């Protein structure tokens, strides 16, 4: 009814004045406040308790059809309440005059919108349970809340000289006549309080009892539980629960049906949205555009793909036509707010799946590496490695963590806090792999030592690929000749790329030689030594072509004088015999180093295999010391004669310098004369040998960091060839190193397992099943092969300690390349167009993109249902 106005100026107006609208709104608000709330009719169930014969099981199965008396009672009650107009206090009293005060407290609790009660621990539920929580658990059932498979250590109750606990047998009852075991699905255990509760009574009963507040009298627990199951209060709650589950038995059945219909509709919309977001996230593509207007060419990939799908999907087309471009406040599930929320939920589920796998595997290793992003914020990449029976070793990226400090203690604190947040015990950490920076590898204040103080078994393993790079870098700075060579390579590249004409001419000369697969010159890198290998190989194999290009530029009068002078200087350096010899040496060394580095970066490589690879590289470098004549012969074949004699000569031999003699004192008259070295010998002593010796010394030093782990686990790769004495010594060393993980019976298990491996030849069908016609043994380490044999033949119980040894060994990082690969995704996702991205969004997008295989296999149906049920709105 409209409220009239007496102002003359408002008479005959086409539209109402603002003051009139406000008055009408206030009047309507006051009128609605006086109306009774529907929750008053839902506060209590008026269903009477059925006879004992009507209860078939103690778990309270859903009834397909309600009884006639109960249905008639509900219909009468609905008709009575619908025809009655009373104020709120009168309605409460009419329902139950003795509990009107308690009902008002319950309504007040429901109106506060609290989220408490959604936990699956009944001990955490509030005393007055809101209706939304009650409906939530009536739909899900009591299965998630039972917790009957634990150790019940929280239920300890001391009585005189003994302590009693809850037992698993209390959750079942044996029929006295048939002997059938019946599950008491209504009985739930709380890990928080250490007590048991009755699920239906906790939800629906208004009478307090020991099973609504928590029961822990374990002395006569069986008798008390059976007595409660036969009580009228319990049976009434069971039947109330049955009819609350049945939509047709509720007075708000139409609202429930409408709500469920809305949920199904929004679930269908969300399924399409989730699939599109999965596609974009796993490929690292941008989601939003400049606007969110359907039909716009700038609305981004997310809305653009949905528009494309709507052409072939009538449901999506109808949804877009009805709900799109309605502005804020209108539910469409097409906005960036919903998409960001869905991305966060998907990332949480992927993270939860990974952490669950880590807890199942128990033992794990961590790897850290950092890099600055486009907004100059240091991002710490957190990677974890663990072993699964089905796939073997698995390396997973978890998250980017912003770094505010680079000290070893702050980084270690960040790692420990992250593991605690994800509920992963640091005591199960058995390895840590970082680069060789002092803040990470320090023996006293380094990150590895601080974490080792928390868990003494967390062995530090320096990244082998990074160590190999440091060996090459150390040798490149070992003598002036090596430094000059790499400076020449970089200067030559800079000279050629400084002009498009020079680079084009360089490419033309390279491409004219079709007999050789030559490459253009490459630039060097300070961190990636694969770039050094490519640059040296390109210049060494196209040495003649580079000289042709430089001669052309140095003699071209059309070029500026500065260009001709620079070309002449580079040409002079390239023509030196010493330069060509060094190019041959470094091409040979870096080619082997690059091949070893590629092998080390494979996720499936094991520690013993990696150490063996570095040892073979060490022997290769040692043999190079005696091959100077071979390098010299190859270099002379590439060089042109440098003087009028027509012979290739060293630079020192071509200089007519005075031979310097050292002044001798009066007591040195009989000493040997100073030896004057030729140009060849001087180059060999001052350049070639220092480079090879530095490579050998640095590689030996880096290998020493893995000697301790090699002593512990080195026998695994040749377990079939080891004697019993060697196996006993290895078992004793492992048990002393891991006293919390391995039992004394490891020795006998190792001896038996060694005989087993002798009877199964490596590469046979028993040990390596064929995968696509190729033996799996050709692609996996012997340790992984043994681990899979144990699980394939269900011998974990027989060789329990051997399986733990293999799991400890396989979970250790060899390199931290997985963390470095995440930097590529970081640069792709957080670029100059998206440099203001929030940290949470960055972590979610990188996790979904890097772990796209995990994203594809996960089922998000339950997430979609929960999301739709919370977001469904009545229109």
Image (cartoon, helix red, strand yellow):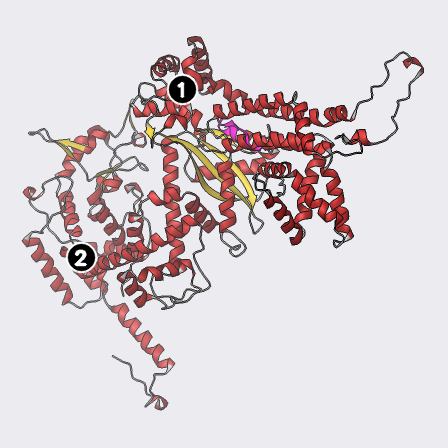
Element type at mark 2: helix
Report the number of numbered marks.
Answer: 2
Which residue in the protein does label 2 denote? 97
In this rendered view, identify the residue nearer to me: 345 or 334: 334
- Is the Cβ of the residue at disc 1 closer than 8 Å to that at disc 2? no
Find residue 227 and report its image quarter.
Answer: top left
Mark 1 lies on residue: 742
Label 1 vs 2, first from the N-terminus: 2
Quadrant holding the N terminus: bottom left
Q: Is residue 156 left or right of residue 243?
A: right
Give the position of the C terminus as an image quadrant: bottom left
What residue lies at 31% left-to-right and 55% top-to-bottom? 272
* 122 versus 447 height, above or below: below
Identity of the residue drawn at 24% across and 50% down: 134
| Label 1 element class | loop
Circle 2 crowding by C-alpha within 10 Å: few under 14, some 14–19, many from 20: few
Q: Is residue 134 left or right of residue 555?
A: left
Residue 547 location, x and y as percent?
A: 69, 41
Residue 79 among those drawn in magenta: no
Q: Position of residue 819 (x, y in %)?
A: 50, 39
């Amino acid at each position: 009814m409209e409220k009239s106005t007496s102002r003359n100026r408002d008479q005959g107006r086409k539209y109402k004045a603002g003051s009139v609208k406000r008055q009408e709104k206030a009047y309507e608000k006051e009128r609605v406040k006086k109306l009774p709330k529907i929750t008053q009719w839902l506060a209590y169930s008026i269903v009477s308790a059925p006879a004992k014969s009507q209860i078939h099981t103690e778990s309270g199965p859903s009834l397909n059809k309600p009884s006639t008396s109960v249905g008639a009672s509900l219909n009468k009650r609905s008709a009575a309440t619908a025809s009655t107009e009373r104020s709120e206090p009168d309605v409460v009293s009419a329902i139950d005059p003795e509990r009107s005060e308690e009902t008002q407290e319950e309504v007040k609790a429901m109106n506060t919108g609290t989220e408490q009660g959604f936990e699956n621990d009944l001990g955490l539920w509030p005393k007055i349970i809101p209706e939304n929580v009650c409906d939530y658990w009536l739909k899900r059932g009591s299965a998630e809340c039972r917790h009957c498979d634990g150790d019940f250590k929280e239920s300890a109750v001391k009585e005189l000289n003994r302590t009693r606990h809850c037992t698993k047998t209390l959750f079942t009852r044996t029929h006295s006549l048939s002997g059938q075991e019946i599950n008491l699905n209504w009985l739930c255990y709380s890990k928080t309080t250490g007590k048991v509760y009755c699920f239906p009574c906790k939800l629906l009963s208004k009478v307090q009892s020991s099973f609504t507040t928590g029961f822990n009298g374990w002395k006569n627990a069986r008798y008390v539980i059976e007595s409660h199951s036969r009580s009228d209060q319990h049976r009434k709650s069971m039947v109330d629960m049955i009819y609350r589950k049945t939509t047709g038995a509720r007075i708000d059945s139409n609202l429930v049906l409408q709500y469920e219909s809305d949920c199904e509709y929004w679930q269908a919309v969300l399924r399409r949205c989730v699939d599109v977001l999965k596609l974009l996230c796993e490929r690292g593509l941008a989601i939003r555009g400049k606007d969110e207007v359907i039909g716009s060419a700038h609305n981004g990939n997310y809305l653009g793909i949905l528009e494309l799908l709507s052409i072939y999907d009538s449901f999506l087309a109808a949804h877009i036509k009805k709900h799109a471009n309605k502005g804020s406040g209108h539910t469409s599930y097409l906005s960036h707010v919903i998409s960001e929320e869905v991305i966060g939920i998907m990332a949480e589920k992927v993270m939860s799946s990974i952490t669950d796998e880590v807890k199942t595997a128990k033992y794990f290793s961590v790897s850290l590496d950092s890099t600055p992003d486009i907004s100059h914020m240091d991002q710490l990449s957190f990677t974890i490695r663990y072993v699964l029976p089905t796939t073997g070793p698995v390396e997973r990226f978890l998250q980017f963590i912003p770094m505010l400090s680079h000290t070893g203690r702050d980084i270690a604190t960040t790692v420990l806090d992250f593991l605690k947040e994800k509920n992963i015990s640091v005591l199960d950490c058995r390895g840590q792999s970082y680069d060789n920076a002092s803040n990470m590898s320090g023996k006293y204040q380094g990150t590895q030592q601080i974490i080792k103080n928390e868990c003494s078994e967390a062995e530090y393993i320096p990244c082998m690929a990074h160590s190999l790079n440091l060996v090459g870098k150390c040798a490149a700075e070992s003598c002036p000749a090596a430094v000059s060579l790499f400076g020449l390579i970089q200067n030559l590249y800079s000279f050629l790329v400084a002009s498009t004409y020079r680079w084009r001419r360089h490419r033309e000369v390279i491409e004219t030689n079709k007999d050789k697969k030559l490459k253009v010159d490459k630039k060097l890198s300070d961190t990636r030594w694969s770039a050094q290998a490519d640059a040296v190989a390109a210049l060494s194999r196209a040495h003649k072509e580079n000289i042709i290009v430089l001669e052309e530029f140095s003699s071209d009068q059309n070029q500026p004088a500065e260009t001709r002078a620079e070309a002449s200087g580079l040409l002079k350096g390239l023509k030196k015999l010493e330069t060509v010899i060094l190019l041959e040496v470094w091409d040979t060394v870096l080619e082997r180093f690059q091949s070893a580095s590629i092998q080390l970066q494979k996720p499936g490589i094991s520690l013993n295999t990696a150490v063996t690879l570095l040892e073979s590289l060490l022997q290769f470098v040692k043999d190079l010391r005696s091959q100077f004549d071979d390098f010299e012969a190859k270099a002379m074949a590439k060089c042109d004669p440098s003087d009028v004699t027509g012979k290739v000569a060293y630079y020192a031999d071509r200089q007519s310098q005075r031979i310097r003699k050292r002044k001798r004192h009066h007591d040195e008259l009989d000493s040997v004369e100073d030896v004057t070295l030729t140009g060849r010998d001087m180059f060999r002593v001052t350049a070639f040998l220092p480079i090879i010796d530095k490579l050998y010394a640095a590689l030996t030093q880096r290998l020493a960091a893995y000697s301790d782990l090699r002593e512990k686990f080195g026998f695994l790769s040749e377990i079939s060839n080891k004697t019993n004495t060697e196996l006993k010594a290895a078992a004793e060393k492992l048990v002393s190193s891991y006293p919390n993980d391995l039992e004394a019976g490891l020795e006998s298990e190792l001896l038996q397992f060694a005989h087993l491996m002798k009877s199964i030849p490596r590469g046979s069908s028993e040990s390596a099943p064929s995968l696509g016609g190729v033996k799996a043994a050709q692609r996996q380490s012997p340790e992984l092969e043994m681990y899979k044999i144990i699980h394939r033949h269900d011998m974990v119980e027989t060789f329990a300690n051997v399986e733990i040894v293999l799991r400890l060994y396989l979970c250790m990082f060899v390199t931290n390349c997985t963390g470095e690969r995440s930097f590529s995704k970081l640069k792709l996702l957080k670029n100059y167009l998206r440099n203001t991205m929030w940290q949470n969004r960055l972590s979610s997008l990188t996790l979904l993109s890097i772990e796209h295989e995990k994203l594809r296999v996960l089922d998000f149906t339950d997430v979609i249902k929960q999301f739709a049920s919370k977001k469904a709105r009545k229109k």
